[in-house]
Amino acid sequence: MLLQQLRHLIGTKRAIPDRLAKIRELKAMIGNPVAVDLVERSTAPESFSSRGEKIVRQRLQRLQKYNATAARKPPIAMLQKIALQSIDLATERHITDVVKIAEAIFENLPPAQKQALNMNRKMASAAAALHDFGKLLVPSAVLRKTAPLTEKDWALIKQHPLFSEILLTLFGFSAETANAAKQHHLSYDLQSGYPAGFFSKLSEVSRLVAVADAIEAMTAGRFNRQPKSMVGAMKQLHAGEGTQFDPKYAEALIVAFRKDSSFRQWWKARREQYRLRRSSEPRALERKRLPNTRRVLDDRQ
Ligand SMILES: [Fe+2]
Ligand SMILES: [Fe+2]
């Protein structure tokens, strides 16, 4: 919450008396130089549009409300609501679907492989549900932009894994969940993705989430891209095995696509939803609701 306040104080166009003194005070209260540095680097002074500012103010009020109800650990259902709904609708859909895909990957691992992992289904779900939490600190105008992203936009977006890690740590989530969020945009061979240079090895759960995240993005048709079909996604999984993707998670998702009937059914309903959305038939969309995949996820002690 203090990070949001800092972002607001730096970015608002409103005249704030003693702005610099207040910023100094807030930084001292946050006491985490890495988090402060990230917020400062990603927020140009007095740069918020009035609409952007209104959205930031709403998020801030929501976070303040949560903070008032539980000083150190906000109720998980509320946090989940923030993760799902406070960013934007496309991100909400993305997060919900990444959870479903991550669970299918976990469930379709060969039993021996599953047992050898230091991970359970709950960990995979939690990491998937919260991987983009840091997007709360990326301006909505950038997340929603349909025009080509500028270099500055990309610089902001590329901060979100680090923001996720910081926020999840502040909210008391396990190091595994926070770490998975920090690593989810790095390729399996560490040769591409961001943030680069922090790691020599990725956690298992982050590699699983990375597969679910990438496949969701390429099949949802976001950013005006034509969505890939199931066959297209499988081709991409094959092509990226060992470089972009951990082969065992890529293979498990291919198995889910081929043989997991409940996952295939969900996938079909999801495709249909996107088709209807593209052809803008709100009524038909209303009737064809996807099965609810939200659930309470809490790995905090
Ligand atoms: Fe992400
Ligand atoms: Fe994501």
Image (cartoon, rainbow, N blue to C red):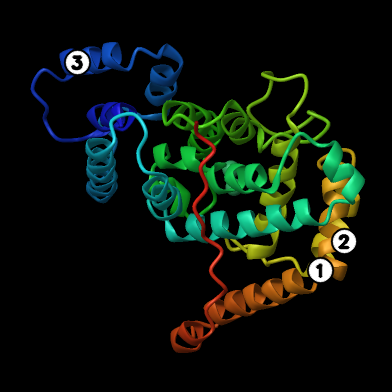
Label 2: which secondary element: helix
Mark 3: give few (<14), some (14-19) or many (20+) Cα within 10 Å.
Answer: few
Residue at 44% x, 23% y is 38
Judged from the image, the secondary structure of the residue bearing numbered disc 1 is loop
Left of 77 or right of it: where is 245? right
- The residue that mark 2 highlights is 255
Disc 1 + disc 2, Cβ < 8 Å? yes
> Considering only vertical position in the picture, is 161 above or below 110?
above
Q: Is mark 1 within 8 Å of ligand 2?
A: no
In the rendered image, the vertical position of residue 281 relative to residue 195, given as above or below: below
Label 3 close to label 1 by CB (< 8 Å): no
Question: Where is residue 51 shown, x and y percent of the image?
Answer: 25, 51
Q: Amino acid at mark 2?
A: Val
Tell me residue 69's x, y (percent).
24, 40
Counting residues from the start of the chain, the first of labels 1 and 2 encountered is: 2
Q: Amino acid at mark 1?
A: Asp
Q: Is residue 26 or residue 151 the one in the foreground?
A: 26
Which of these two is toward me, 177 or 116?
116
According to the image, label 1 marks what residue?
260
Query: Which residue is depicted at the point 77% across and 55% down?
Result: 107
- Residue 298 lies left or right of residue 46; in this view the side is right
Residue occupying the point 67% across, 45% down = 124
Image point (83%, 44%), residue name: 114
Is residue 244 shown above or below 200? below
- First-in-chain label (3 vs 2): 3
Q: What's the amino acid at mark 3?
A: Leu
Give the CA distance from mark 3 to mark 2: 56 Å
Q: Position of residue 120 (x, y in %)?
A: 71, 43
